[in-house]
Image (spheres, grey):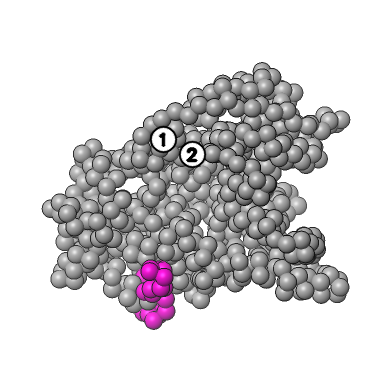
């Protein structure tokens, strides 16, 4: 365990050791603003003293909600300095979600980014017992609000500047590694979100071990653009940032992330598969619009990169001609492409959260981006396994992060024990006991196995989603869904088939990619629904499903998961409609219930099904959309050998 035990202790070290180095940057009005570590500590202490003056007691929860901004990251550390517990919320959470979290943790203070977030809190405030004060960062639109129990961040800091330091220093002196560092809520794929209590020991030890694994340095740069309520963002933008002293950069807005990414050129980068899928989709759209010569050059060099790039990245032997041709491709294609993506300076890149399709993974590595996979969860302070630089594979998630132990239960479920293991689920001892045993082993809920020859962990799927087909063959829907989502035109896929004789699938089109295709082909459409059901779009989807079936058929263990029939949904799956979590994970069981009529039609052999679906509009109103959805047959590749059944799934 490191000598420094808490995040505030690392703040002091950084201010004294890296005082003039950049701790945070934020793009505002087109200009990058910078906070040095010395300035950051000053502002954090002013916030902490202001919170104490406003009545924050030791151990009380403070909710933080808003987009990624330096002051909000600093406010979480300020809450820790004041003896409180920060609880970040998803900025796109609706009133009901906010009400649940604020009520569940009994938040006494809320630090909100802007007027929109303040309004959401005010809307549910009468249901939150004990909420005493709201602090807002952006003062625009707030002048006429009742400020009797509300203040600006600037006013809070001004109050703090006039306060004596003694009480804050007394509270900090009482803190140890066992003190609660943060409480983060799970995504809630199967029920209400649970509050995961993580100590300073959990966050610090995990950050130190994972940073050492990849040789993260004070000179590294990251872009903080993922939800602040997600454990990954907390580890990267608070935990690892504090223990290494690297710079956290915040984009101007969600709309400018890609532009700001190119300007910053981070050296350490994390993105869930969805982001990498979107980036690749945008690249493919641009290449479809490119001239014939440029398109041919792109295709030629990308084909070469597919075979040579990963070998060069892993330090393996490559012939002189292949090496020369790859360097030429770097000048003509790969370099400009990485620059366009904002990934030119990447030293370490990670993806996690969902399994990434091997084709997508190999694409990025082929152009020289050191993209790796990690496996983790909120209850582990993120890191369970990571991939070493010379052991990167698309079909595994690597070996245990230093300090982590793994074991596989008889039913195939993955268990781990680590310094990052959470303390408890807040106010939920039953769930805590069912997830973490007295010896500290935590059930992940994922099915997988450890390769004997390499020690690498392979994740098959969520344990609750892994099942059997009617003939006993293994059913693992994520395996097929990830292959489907590799195609730029497919935004989301949900495969069904547990206990059935065959698999069926729901598809969502990517409106950007398919809309671009429609424009180039002079196809007019008035809505997402109309475009999704267009006959030519259906045929494109059929072609993609057929290709995936051919690929799935090659896997002896999972060949029974080929998609026999599919449909293109008439609406995007949406978190506001409770079909996905805020981290974009599909709520499979709820979708099965909500669209039972469509699933019945797929299995019943119908050609189309009329359906009505309740939706939530941006202003919170409910409505219904009506559609006649086409049901489509796909080509299935015959498999002669009897499918192999994974013993762990028995």
Dot placed on the residue nearer the N-terminal end, 1 or 2: 2
Category of crowding for the residue at label 2, using alpha-carbon neighbours closer than 10 angstroms: few (below 14), some (14–19), many (at least 20): some
The location of residue 55, given as percent across then percent down, is 17, 56
Q: Nearer the viewer, residue 226 or 233?
A: 226
Q: Nearer the viewer, residue 383 or 333?
A: 333
Q: Nearer the viewer, residue 19 or 210?
A: 19
In the rendered image, is residue 104 in sight?
no
Circle 1 or circle 2, nearest the eye:
1
Q: Residue at x 53, y 38 (%)?
A: 527
Q: Residue at x 45, y 68 (%)?
A: 249
Q: Which residues are magenta?
A: 11-35
> Does 19 appear in magenta?
yes
Q: Are marks 1 and 2 in contact (CB under 8 Å)?
A: yes
Q: Residue at x 20, y 63 (%)?
A: 156
Q: Is residue 353 left or right of residue 602?
A: left
Q: Is residue 114 above or below residue 21?
A: above
The location of residue 272, given as percent across then percent down, is 56, 53
In the rendered image, is residue 349 in sight?
yes
Q: Which mark is residue 126?
A: none
Q: Which mark is residue 616?
A: 1
> Does 64 appear in magenta?
no
Q: Nearer the viewer, residue 170 or 93?
A: 93
Q: Residue at x 77, y 64 (%)?
A: 293
Q: Which mark is residue 574?
A: 2
SS at badge 2: loop
Give the number of callouts: 2
Q: Is residue 75 above or below residue 188?
A: below
Q: Quadrant of residue 429?
A: top left
SS at badge 1: strand
The location of residue 314, given as percent across then percent down, is 73, 66
The location of residue 579, given as percent across then percent down, is 49, 35
């Amino acid at each position: 365990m490191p000598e420094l035990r808490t995040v505030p202790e690392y703040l002091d070290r950084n201010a004294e050791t890296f005082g003039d180095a950049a701790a945070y940057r934020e793009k505002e009005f087109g200009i990058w603003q910078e906070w040095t570590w010395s300035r950051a500590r000053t502002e954090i202490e002013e916030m902490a003293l202001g919170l104490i003056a406003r009545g924050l007691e030791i151990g009380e929860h403070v909710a933080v909600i808003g987009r990624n901004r330096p002051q909000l990251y600093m406010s979480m550390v300020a809450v820790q300095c004041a003896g409180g517990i920060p609880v970040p919320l998803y900025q796109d959470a609706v009133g009901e979600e906010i009400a649940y979290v604020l009520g569940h943790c009994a938040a006494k203070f809320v630090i909100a980014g802007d007027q929109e977030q303040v309004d959401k809190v005010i809307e549910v405030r009468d249901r939150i017992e004990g909420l005493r004060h709201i602090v807002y960062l952006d003062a625009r639109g707030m002048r006429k609000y009742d400020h009797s129990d509300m203040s600006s961040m600037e006013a809070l800091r001004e109050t703090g500047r006039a306060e004596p330091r003694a009480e804050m220093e007394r509270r900090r002196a009482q803190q140890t590694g066992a003190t609660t560092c943060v409480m983060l809520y799970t995504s809630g794929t199967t029920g209400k979100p649970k509050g995961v209590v993580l100590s300073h020991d959990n966050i610090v030890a995990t950050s130190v071990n994972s940073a050492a694994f990849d040789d993260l340095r004070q000179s590294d740069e990251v872009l903080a653009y993922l939800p602040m309520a997600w454990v990954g963002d907390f580890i990267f933008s608070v935990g690892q940032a504090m223990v290494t002293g690297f710079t956290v950069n915040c984009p101007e807005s969600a709309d400018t992330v890609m532009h700001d990414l190119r300007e910053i050129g981070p050296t350490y980068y994390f993105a869930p598969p969805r982001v990498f899928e979107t980036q690749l989709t945008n690249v493919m759209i641009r290449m479809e619009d490119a001239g014939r010569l440029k398109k041919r050059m792109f295709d030629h060099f990308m084909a070469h990169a597919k075979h040579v790039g990963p070998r060069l990245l892993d330090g393996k032997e490559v012939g002189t001609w292949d090496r020369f041709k790859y360097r030429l491709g770097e000048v003509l294609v790969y370099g400009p492409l990485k620059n366009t993506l904002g990934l030119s300076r990447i030293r370490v890149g990670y993806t996690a959260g969902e399994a990434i399709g091997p084709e997508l993974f190999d694409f990025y590595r082929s152009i020289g981006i050191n993209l790796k996979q990690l496996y983790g969860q909120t209850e582990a302070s993120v890191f369970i396994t990571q991939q070493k630089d010379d052991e990167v594979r698309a079909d595994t998630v690597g070996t245990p992060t230093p300090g982590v132990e793994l074991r596989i239960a008889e039913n195939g479920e993955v268990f781990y024990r680590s310094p990052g293991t959470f303390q408890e689920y807040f106010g939920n001892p039953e769930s805590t006991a069912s997830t973490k045993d007295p010896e500290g082993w935590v059930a992940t809920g994922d099915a997988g196995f450890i390769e004997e020859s390499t020690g690498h962990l392979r994740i098959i799927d969520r344990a609750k989603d892994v099942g059997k087909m009617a003939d006993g063959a293994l059913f693992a829907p994520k395996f097929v869904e990830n292959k489907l989502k590799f195609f730029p035109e497919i935004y989301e896929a949900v495969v069904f088939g547990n206990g059935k004789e065959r698999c069926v699938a729901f598809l969502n089109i990517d409106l950007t990619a398919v809309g671009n295709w429609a424009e180039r082909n002079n196809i007019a459409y008035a809505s997402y629904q109309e475009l999704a059901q267009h006959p030519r779009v259906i045929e494109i989807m059929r072609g993609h499903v057929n290709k995936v079936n051919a690929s799935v058929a090659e896997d002896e263990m999972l060949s029974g998961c080929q998609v026999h029939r599919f449909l293109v949904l008439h609406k995007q799956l949406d978190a506001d409609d409770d079909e996905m979590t805020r981290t974009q994970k599909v709520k499979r069981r709820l979708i099965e219930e909500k669209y039972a009529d469509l699933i019945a039609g797929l299995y019943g052999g119908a050609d189309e099904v009329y359906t009505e679906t309740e939706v939530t509009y941006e202003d919170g109103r409910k409505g219904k959309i009506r559609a006649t959805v086409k049901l489509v047959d796909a080509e299935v590749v015959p498999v002669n050998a009897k499918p192999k059944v994974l013993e762990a799934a028995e």
